[in-house]
Image (cartoon, rainbow, N blue to C red):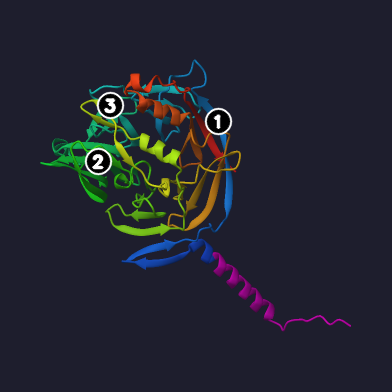
Amino acid sequence: MITKYRPPRGMWMVWFAVLVLLLSTAGGRASAGEVAERDGVPHVLNEAQPAEGTQSLRLEEQWRVGADEDDILLGVVSAVVAGEDGSLYLLDRQLCQVHVFSSEGVYQRSLSRRGEGPGELGDPVALSFMPDGSLGIAQARPGKIVKLALDGTPRGSLLPGGEQAGTMGFHGIEGVAYRGDVLAICGTTMSPGEDGFTRTNYLGVYAEDGTEKARVLEKSRQGAFGDRRFVEKDNYFVDRGRWALSPDGRLYTVPERDSYAIHVYAPDGRLERVFERPYQPWKRNQEEKDEIGGRVVMIINGERVKIESIVEDHDPCISAIEIMDNGEVWVAHSRSARELPAGTFATYDVFSPEGHFLRQVAIMGDYKSEGDRLFLLGDGHAVMVTGFRDAFSSLFARGGDEEEEGETEEPAPLEVIFCTVTD
């Protein structure tokens, strides 16, 4: 005879409570990670694997431009922002214009042109709406932010540090963003001295008139005139997509090249927290090292000169960060576009605003990971620019010694594809 064991009354509730406690404790360890305080700053120490596993999302095309001969001519589209009405503003670095399309893909107008007059552009590198509602276009050199009304009317310019800053040596701008009532600018200053110069990279928070409110990060180094060496590690900074503004105006930055660590700053420049995870960066082969060294161009007296490039054995751990409208932090790393399964364009690590490693996302689509570029708009939409790498490389290859280098093949025309990001 088999006798079934029946727990005493009340034991079912005790076991159930213990089970819930164990599950919640295990889940808490995975999602929250360990939080340690270092020098008064919380550090979120995530595990290598995310709490929620992996997720696949696909790009569903809504419309595209650039494929037909009747489409508007596109040069090198290097930045994209979306207006409140859903219109897309595409910064064309080659043509020095901003092309405007409706949310349905209908061409509206092109703003600005190449030149040095009011509202005109020289070397545009970044795009953002400004506190007064105008469109701000960051010009690399000479560094300033050209402001335009949305109909293209010039609204003046903003110079970080005020007009006096422009008289104190070279000033370049690498990026600008306005979000959560915070205006942030990333740039470079270069001050001459008797034996050389001092170059300073900076990321700061600014008022509408260009007055600096807080210096968040900076890195200075000395250089000698005529120095024909490029040391990759010494030139690393948070520019080139390694900083972003959150919806509440906090700055998420990657100040350490060889560490998978994101530093979060308040708008007043205070370091609030750091979050990180174990990570092994991509090790470069010799071909990759030679290709990276070949990207560096130095112009002396209007002529391109050969330089010695000293590059690292590994890629930087983090290549870019994006912050969605819900505050999630999407991180592209050195392996995001490498060794991917067929049909996968790129992978991202996704963190909560507080820095907990939530999941890894695979973006699916029939695009080229090494050649096309994806702009995440933060609201469930994205813009894919096909042929970006070839077009960008061709743009900066021009101006070299054609007799020595020979003629370069013209890249295929760019296509801009507006997509929704779906499950």
Residue placed at 47% from the left, 25% from the top? 414
> Residue 300: x and y, percent?
22, 29
> Residue 162: x and y, percent?
17, 39
Q: Which of the two marks, 3 or 2, is nearer to us in this view?
A: 2
Magenta segment: 1-27
Q: Which of the two marks, 2 or 1, is nearer to us in this view?
A: 2
Q: Residue furthest left?
A: 194
Residue 202 visible? The answer is yes
With 215 as the anchor, is 22 left or right in this view?
Answer: right
Mark 2 secondary-structure assignment? strand
Residue type, numbered disc 2: Thr
Dots 3 and 2: beta carbons under 8 Å?
Answer: no
Circle 1 crowding by C-alpha within 10 Å: few under 14, some 14–19, many from 20: few
| Precedes in sequence: disc 2 or disc 1 | 1
Residue type, numbered disc 1: Gln
Identify residue for label 3.
122
- Would residue 402 be counted in the magenta stretch? no
Q: Which of the two marks, 1 or 3, is nearer to us in this view?
A: 3
Identify residue for label 1.
62
| Precedes in sequence: disc 3 or disc 2 | 3
Identify residue for label 2.
188
> Residue 280: x and y, percent?
47, 54
The main secondary structure of the magenta stretch is helix
- Would residue 20 be counted in the magenta stretch? yes
> Residue 157: x and y, percent?
23, 32
Circle 3 crowding by C-alpha within 10 Å: few under 14, some 14–19, many from 20: many
Mark 3 secondary-structure assignment? loop
Circle 2 crowding by C-alpha within 10 Å: few under 14, some 14–19, many from 20: many
C-alpha span from label 3 to label 2: 17 Å
| Precedes in sequence: disc 1 or disc 3 | 1
Q: Quadrant of the N terminus?
A: bottom right
